[in-house]
Image: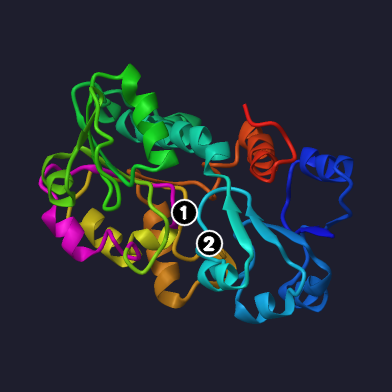
Amino acid sequence: MIFITANAHPFLEETFRKNGREVRYCPSITYDELFADIDKASGLVVTTRMKIDKPLLDRAKNLQWIGRLGSGLELIDTDYASQKGIKCISTPEGNRNAVAEHVLAMLLGLMNNIYKSAAEVKEKVWMRNENRGIELSGKTVGIVGFGNAGAAFAKILAAFDVTILAYDKYKEGFGDHRVREANFEQLCRYADVISFHVPLTTETKHMADKGFFDALTQKPYIINACRGAVVDTQALVSAIQNHQIMGAGLDVLENEQLNTLSESQKIAFEYLVSQPNVLITPHIAGYSYEAYYKMSKTLLEKLGMLPAF
């Protein structure tokens, strides 16, 4: 039986059934409920809703694979799964373009005061000089992490006359006529925009910390549409207060369960949403209608249930 524990496009369940698989579609299943029945599962489809940890994997006697709709496997104990012969599959190809377009939209919106001025007009405030924009053309854009989403963002920037600097600790030789490979220090020194596209690991947690913001020289725009904990929220607040950055676009937060914010998190959140140069969206960058379908299609292709194109 295949358990689909996340909201997924109907095409996924339909194709599993066409391939003769029994499916349980349970997007609201709790950890405890899954734990009770995981021994029945041969396949498991997940997103970021729950941890797939050792106790669960120990009970999953018949589990052959775990499919992640989207990118990032940090909630799955992949090492332990591998030891037990369980294949872990992610589908970053399915939503990379959606992430790239969302990041670009956030960036252009911030640079041109789109959201700020639109909100003012709703209040019948008409200010032109105060909302004069900054062109992206001619700027240097730094991309941290050159995987699927980072590369897709670089591709979409091809329409703009920008210099692209990309840093990836685990890749080299990816530079071309559009993209220059750089180290992290060079991004901090030269970039007018820095966009994060890295998985959440012990290395990348709070990658954008006080030291990072103190090292910036161009007062860049900071964009984060990967994982909230990559940016230290308190350090970001200080950077805005100290005018170290021009603004921030965040599609992710360290704590996205807004009804569970600690007192310090509440203060930081309320400060950020009150700033005209900060834009926060509810983790929707990789969740377009097209990506919703393509993530399922990509998983099916990787499982060999659809021909890959």
Q: Nearer the viewer, residue 303 or 200?
A: 303
Q: Nearer the viewer, residue 96 or 2?
A: 2
SS assignment at label 2: loop
SS assignment at label 1: loop
Q: Quadrant of the C terminus?
A: top right
Q: Which residue is mark 2?
A: 256
Q: Residue 96: horizontal and vertical position, in percent?
A: 50, 37
**Marks 1 & 2, CB-CB < 8 Å contact:** yes
State the separation of the CA atoms marked 1 and 2: 7 Å
Q: Residue 228: horizontal and vertical position, in percent?
A: 43, 59
Q: Does 78 sit above or below residue 89?
A: below
- Taking the magenta stretch, the answer to whether it contains residue 225 is yes
Q: Which residues are magenta?
A: 204-227
Q: Quadrant of the N terminus?
A: bottom right
Q: Does 214 sit above or below residue 115?
A: below
Q: Residue 297: horizontal and vertical position, in percent?
A: 68, 37
Q: Nearer the viewer, residue 105 or 84?
A: 84
> Label 1 neighbourhood size at 10 Å, few (<14), some (14-19), many (20+)?
many
- Taking the magenta stretch, the answer to whether it contains residue 128 is no
Residue at 53% of width from left, 38% of height from top? 93
Residue at 26% of width from left, 53% of height from top? 169
Lateral position of residue 47 relative to residue 159, left or right? right
Q: Which residue is mark 1?
A: 252
Q: Does 128 sit above or below residue 95?
A: above
Lateral position of residue 71 relative to residue 210, left or right? right
Residue at 23% of width from left, 22% of height from top? 177
Lateral position of residue 15 relative to residue 155, left or right? right
**Looking at the rendered structure, which numbered label has been put on residue 194?**
none
Question: What type is the residue that disc 1 sits on?
Answer: Val
> Label 2 neighbourhood size at 10 Å, few (<14), some (14-19), many (20+)?
few
Q: Residue 235: horizontal and vertical position, in percent?
A: 26, 64
